[in-house]
Image (tube, rainbow, N blue to C red):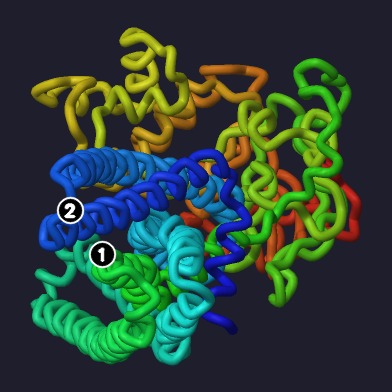
Amino acid sequence: MNTLTPVVALLRRIRRGRDFAVSVACIVALQLTLAASLALSSLAVTSTVLAAGGGVVAALLLAAGAAMLAHGLFVWLESWFSHAFAYRVLGGLRKDVHRAIERAAPMGLGRRRTGDVVARAMGDVETLEWFFAHTLGAALAALITPSVLIGVLTALTGPQALLLLLPAVLLVLVPAVFQRRQRQAGTELRERTGALAVTALDGIQSIAELLSRGRTDALQQQLKDGTAGIQRVKARIAWLRGGEGALVEVILAATSLLVLLALAFQAGEIPLLLLPTLSGLAMAALNPVMGLAGILARIGEISAASSRVLEILDLPDPLDHALETAPPPSAGRADSAPALEFADVRFSFPGGPAVLDGVSFQVPRGQTLAIVGESGAGKSTLGSLMLRFADPNDGVVRVDGHDARTLEPDELRRLVALIPQDSFVFASSVRTNLRLADPAAGDEALWSALRRAALAERIGVLPDGLDGLPGDRGEGLSGGERQRLGLARAFLRDPEILVLDESLASLDPELEERILTELRLARADRTTVLIAHRLRSIEAADAVLFLAAGRVRAQGTHEELLHREDYRGLLASQLPDPPPAPGGRAADEKGGATHGEPGH
């Protein structure tokens, strides 16, 4: 792939034409005013040496001074507008990257590590600041300014001035000689930087475990090796840039000699007064191109950063938005429709085996369904489809009788809330963490939610109460307390459908029972889905869906399913007594009993 291909692809997404035009105009203006100040100063000095009139010299010096002042003004304006343009572009780019991550997550990021995604979203985007602030505008100005100055020289000296086009072209071609190696080194640098970020983040998050096992030396060695690898790549990049710089200096020296020979050849035709001025203009014409050649030495790293950012921006959307036309369920609810329904749903990740294969079930409004099965049976995937983190490959998920694909994701997620097993706790106050569920909630509502989640007493002993800080990722709270903070958010949000994905797994039996009671009492018409493996949670459900290898093995009440050997085997370690004598049989996936109907 050409080094410039990802850079050009990224540029096509930028919509800042006016800001860019102003930035380029300032660069051209500062380059031309610099050339003018040098030419006028040279002309004034030469006029003094040749004893020209004092008025002429004074006028030239005044003009040179004005050009210098203008140059200083345009230097300031260029710095302002170029960086303002760059920061606006980077701000928009960071938003686009975040939207892409939000769109694809949590099911679409594939095998990318969190540290690598962070490195792309922050480090790689920051690397592009150099390109937008110092390279993009300079590249265009390197075409405009030399063209203007060579045009002036041609008007003063004749077509011989067009010889300056040759070194100008050579200066631009210098980076092309090193293009492939620069891109390879730049790609390796960005990948190694991302890998080091992953290692550092993993080390920080697992430091307690590493310390307990005496394995911090292994982490230190990984960090040392990663840093050494980056330094080796940077040394190679420096060597390449040194080679480019040497070629540029050779071309510049040859150009100076060429200009002097050309002026000497025309010594009889050009006034002696103009010779120093013309020589200065010739070098000024090449100066922007020479500067661009130095800037382009970083194009390999910039190209690699652009590729990594584009990979995030181009993450596929797991949702089909073409059907999002229906009104919100609350506006068109049919009381006879089940709150939640899966109809012959099939799902698999791209290129992977089937995770769900023909899953069908219904959950009547106000009922509680427990979903059980071995690890890998597809339980959490069901929860993700309920929230529309992805759409099924086949079949339909319905919420209050509406095809979930017809509902905008944000609207659907106002009705359906998912509490994961490991609720994320932000490095902010308890108040801020709770208000994720309801930004307008007052202190009374916050404390009420904490009491329902059996967490009010714990938060109450914090020095700052609701304004207390639970630490980075909630490190100041136990696993069970983090789960209860997630449950408090659910109580505060009060959704129509609540999905608990092993959210009670870290609670002791008494707390589990208390939370289950609060869930029942908080809202009689709420539909609850418990993805669970603990017996008490399963017993609290009105019905149970038994999954195995992505298929519905059986569904019915807990008592009905206890007569199945495979179901008893799943819960064997938690069953205190042998199951009762058979008095009925749970409906299997071919038997046809749906949730709310008797098994037969």
Q: Under tag 1, what secondary structure?
A: helix
Above or below, comparing residue 505 to residue 49 in the picture:
above
Residue at the image position 24 percent from the left and 38 percent from the top:
66
Report if residue 474 is visible in the image: no
Q: Which residue is mark 2?
A: 52
Foreground mark, 1 or 2? Answer: 2
**At which x and y percent is residue 224?**
14, 82
**At which x and y percent is residue 410?**
64, 32
Residue type at the position of mark 2: Ala
Residue at the image position 43 percent from the left and 13 percent from the top:
440
Report if residue 418 is visible in the image: yes
**At which x and y percent is residue 537?**
51, 42
Name the disc covering residue 273, or none. Answer: 1
Residue type at the position of mark 1: Leu
Q: Nearer the viewer, residue 124 or 491?
A: 124
Q: Quadrant of residue 118?
A: bottom left
